[in-house]
Amino acid sequence: MRSSRVPDRALQSGPECGKDSMSHAGRFSVRKSKLIRDDSGSVLILGIGLSVLALAVVTVVINVATLWLARSTLNSLADGAALYAAQAVDTTLIYTDGLGTELTIDSAKAKNHIHEYLGLSAVKQQLSDLRVDHVQVESNAVQVTLSARAHLPFGYFLPVQVERIAATARSINKVR
């Protein structure tokens, strides 16, 4: 005994079957509607799509966090270099003219202090291709601009190519 919803005479073809018979096109539409209603495997496709999206979001977040950390490190290094350079006080002026109201910074000593500070092994290991872009020494202030190369762990996912990051710090000597 057959357990089918379609009667046996509907499966027959030809003019002798009458109005109750189902044509070949009708049987095809029944199969097509069954395929459309059948959603087996669609959850797998959705899961794969969401996994790819989650992976892309994680890699972008890691890249942004790496850039933020490198920028923060470079800011700290620029602050340290500027503070160390501001300690390069021209001592000959203090001995000849007295202390006065402001400490004058020796330009050559300040630049040497910056390179000495950045030459320390602990500083060199923090960022790659660290450069001193600009040093401006005024009478009682030093401004330092540093740059470094940012290496992103998943750089191919970030649409913007980041060549170098830069940071500027300024330190002022005041006598109180």
Image: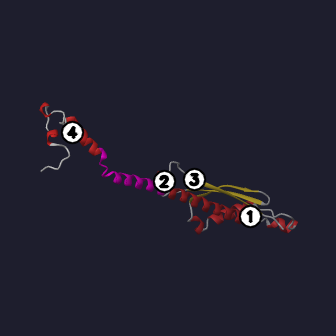
Vertical arrangement, residue 77 with respect to residue 22, above or below: below
According to the picture, the residue beneath numbered tag 2 turns out to be 155
Nearer the observer, disc 1 or disc 2? 2
The CA span between labels 1 and 2 is 37 Å
Give residue 89's position: percent from left, percent from top.
77, 65
Q: Which residue is mark 1?
A: 86
- Identity of the residue drawn at 24% across and 42% down: 31
Residue of label 4: 27
Say which of 112 and 166 sits in front: 166
**Of label 1 and label 2, which has the lower sequence position?**
1
Give the label, 2 or 4, closer to the camera: 4
Classify mark 1: residues with Cα within 10 Å, few (<14), some (14-19) or many (20+).
Answer: many
Q: Which residue is mark 3?
A: 164
Q: Earlier in the sequence, mark 2 or mark 3?
A: 2
SS label for mark 2: helix
Find residue 138 and report its image quarter. bottom right
Residue type at mark 3 is Arg
Q: Does the residue at mark 2 contact the one at mark 3 (Cβ under 8 Å)?
A: no
Image coordinates of residue 121 in percent, x first then y, are: 58, 68
The CA distance from mark 2 to mark 3 is 13 Å
**Secondary structure under badge 4?**
helix
Residue 49: mark: none
Colouring method of the image: secondary structure
| C-alpha distance separating marks 3 and 4 | 66 Å
Q: Going from the N terminus, do you reach mark 4 or mark 1 first?
A: 4
